[in-house]
Amino acid sequence: MTVTRFAPSPTGNLHIGNIRTAILSWMCARSRGGQFVLRIDDTDRERSEERFVESIRADLGWLGLTPDAAVRQSERTGLYERRFEELRAAGRVYPAYETTQELDLKRKVQLGRGLPPIYDRAALTLTDADRAKFAAEGVQPHWRFKLDPGAIEWDDLIRGHQHFDAATMSDPVIRRADGSWLYMLPSVIDDIDLAITHVVRGEDHVSNTALQIQMFAALGASVPLFAHAALLTGAEGKLSKRLGSLGAEHFREEGIEPQAIVSLLARIGTSDPVEPFADPAPLIAAFDFARFGRAPARFDEGELAQLNARIVHQLDYDAVTDRLPAGIDRAGWEAIRPNLTTIADAADWWHVVEGPIDATVDAEDRDFLAAAHRIAGEIDWSSDPWHALTAALKDATGRKGKPLFLPLRRALTGRDHGPDMAALLPLIGRARALERLSA
Ligand code: GLU
């Protein structure tokens, strides 16, 4: 069975980049009838905050990306400890004592000599006596994972064949001197323990993957499949700082529906067209990593707004009732809906229905509107008053097209554009229409 996970660190709110990662991971699971796990990466005690754990959960709920299971790394340290001990017994992790300054200096010397700044493994040459001396001085080691020499390769579901040479990489630090964990090893231990089959994440993790593949092997586990999505850029095609600050709250305030976000982020960077899906089922059914390209995906807020309008036009009355101003019924929603870009705009159009409105009338339309007022008082309002009114007015005045329709729309709504008058006029109703035409 397919199991995917989304693994945010609760050091901030989700932004558009990690929302996209969540969507891809969720779609991968859903498209294969699998499970989608939320893993809160909260090993960094200082930077993790409870309010972000809550906002991450709330945002995923709002987006409809409901996890089938949720775990927190801070509650799983016993497992990390056990697996760490196995690696230690097998000689795959080793203690190192260099200070940050010493490591910096080593790197500078290497770079000065034109060498790659790879950790020199000096800690592996320490004797038991050296280590005992550090211990006697109260110096605790940090821990590194010992890479095996040789090629590290995998077939990435998005990037294709990937090749790294372990000789060009430093043994990664996996644990700090105070015993706390860095991201790298707990992530692998969890992926094994939770039986993750597909690791879906951003391409900024590609080199981590090379290191982690060796960790899976060292822990005697099979390696999951990996899909590294290309980074997101702004509409102008550049990596933009703004993207890092755009989160669910911003979009909610802008009146963006979660389905618009899912529809857009599921498709940008793919060879499939961006289309509005009020229900994600067809999006999930068509999901395929092979459709994703390696070029950066462009996120355009203007495109999102347009998509949002198209989503709003599809939304059923039942899905929006609790967000509509009091008084709008199904017919009202259906009349107004095609003119909305956000649901909040419904209030403006409802105001047009209920009034009072501000309408100005051109002098040359006064007689025409007086005739409209008279006819409006005579027609049958029970079925289709707009067609009855305009047909009779056309006969009476000889006007047709724009000179017939526009002054009526202006007088009845105070605007030049808007919802279909045939749908709107019954909502405005006879009394208000007569009053507006006589004004
Ligand atoms: N917490 C890591 C991050 O947010 C998770 C990366 C991963 O998916 O393995 O970047």
Image (cartoon, rainbow, N blue to C red):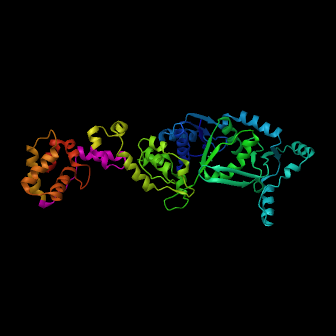
Residue shown at 20% from the left, 52% from the top: 409
Position in image of residue 40 (x %, y %)? 61, 39
Outermost residue on the bottom side: it is 113
Is residue 18 found left or right of 426 in the rendered image? Answer: right
Relative to residue 217, is residue 239 depicted above or below? below
Q: Answer with the quarter of the image where residue 105 lies.
A: bottom right
Q: Answer with the quarter of the image where residue 178 lies.
A: top right
Tell whether position 325 is magenta.
no
Residue shown at 26% from the left, 51% from the top: 418
Position in image of residue 350 (x %, y %)? 27, 44
Is residue 343 found left or right of 16 in the rendered image? Answer: left
Position in image of residue 295 (x %, y %)? 56, 58
Is residue 254 found left or right of 392 in the rendered image? Answer: right
Bounds of the magenta segment? 335-364
Q: Answer with the quarter of the image where residue 72 lies.
A: top right
Residue shown at 27% from the left, 45% from the top: 351
Q: Is residue 417 visible?
A: yes
Tell whether position 359 is magenta.
yes
Outermost residue on the right side: it is 129
Q: Report the front residue among 352 and 227.
A: 227
Name the magenta segment's main secondary structure: helix
